[in-house]
Amino acid sequence: MKLVNADAIVVGGGAAGMMAAGHAARLGAKVLLLEKTDLLGKKLLITGKGRCNITNSRPVSDLLECYPGGAKFLRGPLHRFSNTDVIHFFEDLGVPTKVERGGRVFPCSDRADTVVSALRRFVLTSGAQVQLNAKVVEVLTRAAPAEKPRVYGVKLADGRQLTTNNVVITTGGKSYPGTGSSGDGYELAARLGHCIEELFPALVPLRIQEQWARDLQGLSLRNVTATLLVNGKVVSREFGEMLFTSFGVSGPIILTLSRAAAIALRQGAEVKLRLNLKPALDEKQLDNRLQRDFQKYSRKQLHNGLVDLLPKALIDPVIAEAGIEPNQPVNQITKEQRTRLVDTLTGLEMTVTDTLGLAAAIVTAGGVSLKEVSPQTMESKLVQGLFFAGEVLDIDGVTGGYNLQAAFSTGRVAAESLRY
């Protein structure tokens, strides 16, 4: 395809980029979407475990509480293009949605490729041109004396230069670099004078020191509470599902806690996770439950007397952490030992040694400083005609559809704010 000059060039074909390109074209702009890989929406295909959690159904005021990074900045964009708007947008594209636990919104197909295909059609039917395998290495600007620089084009890796009055950088973060999110946007922005807030992984699995935890690889727990402690102080607490892995722990509640863990680890703090395996019971209720089970299995050994209370794989680690011999007969368990069991069941501790890093993170925290971007337009305050949207900005949300919502909202606002 022959490349032509455009009213706007969008750099990056992910969620924010496709939204920005398609909507700007619908508004009448001559748009060119440049994607450095061979496919639009590569990262979208793996989001939500391949199901693509496009947004969350909670009220917008509640949504804003779910962005540890950038909540104040997002207030305007989320109201201008809300979660309800996102749902209607996809339904208009032929993608009906459903709401699941925690307000998570998925396509009824349970397939991320349904969402990606719809977005690709949206871009093309809106009239935007798309060029794949086109890497932008520089945003070209010029400035008259005593004026801010102004965008006039981009330079590609193959040496070609394209002219435009508007460039929208939607290159994503540095997570899952195999999908194209390798941090190019940060370099482009930095060259133009933008401050890049320190990057670190958010929504990322955690490495655990204790071998017993790694030996539980594949075990999934539901309805548990995980508490994050930094230097012995409680920082955050989450209730829900988690997963043990070969390196430590993952799953929704772990991912949500991981941002604070990553910050603490960077500061050299001691980071621990404390699991309450039975949060629905207080200590007295749990002790009563143990006594009932012990009566039922009075002739069994202890590790066979907890089969009604815990998953089989978790029984011996809990007993070991409580400092009790697993082969001890149930009818010989003392009150003091029972108390230790209760304490362990409600406070099973693990030591966090590291995260899996940016390459394994669902979201990158940090990015283009929000102080240098207008939340009303997504335009740079430093360079006229330069816009940002999506994960390249210093914005990150918890798990549950919030990050894609931010990408769609900021991409939409950027499209509506272009200079002609």
Image: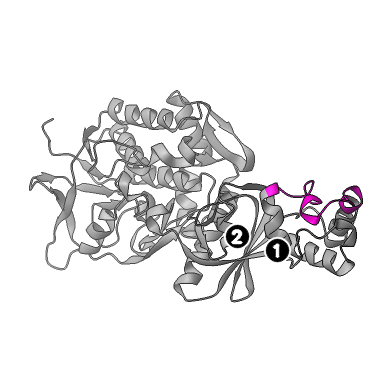
- Coordinates of residue 110 in the picture (x, y in percent): 51, 30
- Coordinates of residue 393 in the picture (x, y in percent): 37, 56
Q: Does dot 2 land on a helix, a strand or a loop?
A: helix
Give the residue type that dot 2 points to.
Answer: Trp
* Residue located beneath label 1 in the image: 320
Q: What's the magenta region?
A: 293-312
In three-dimensional space, the C-alpha distance between marks 1 and 2, rounded to whole angstroms, equals: 10 Å
Q: Is residue 205 left or right of residue 121?
A: right
| Residue 212 marker | 2
Give the residue type that dot 1 points to.
Answer: Ala
- Coordinates of residue 202 in the picture (x, y in percent): 46, 58
Q: Main secondary structure of the magenta part?
A: loop
Q: Is residue 125 above or below residue 267?
A: above
Is residue 336 at least partly visible in the picture? yes
Would residue 179 be counted in the magenta stretch? no
Residues 9 and 42: in front is 42
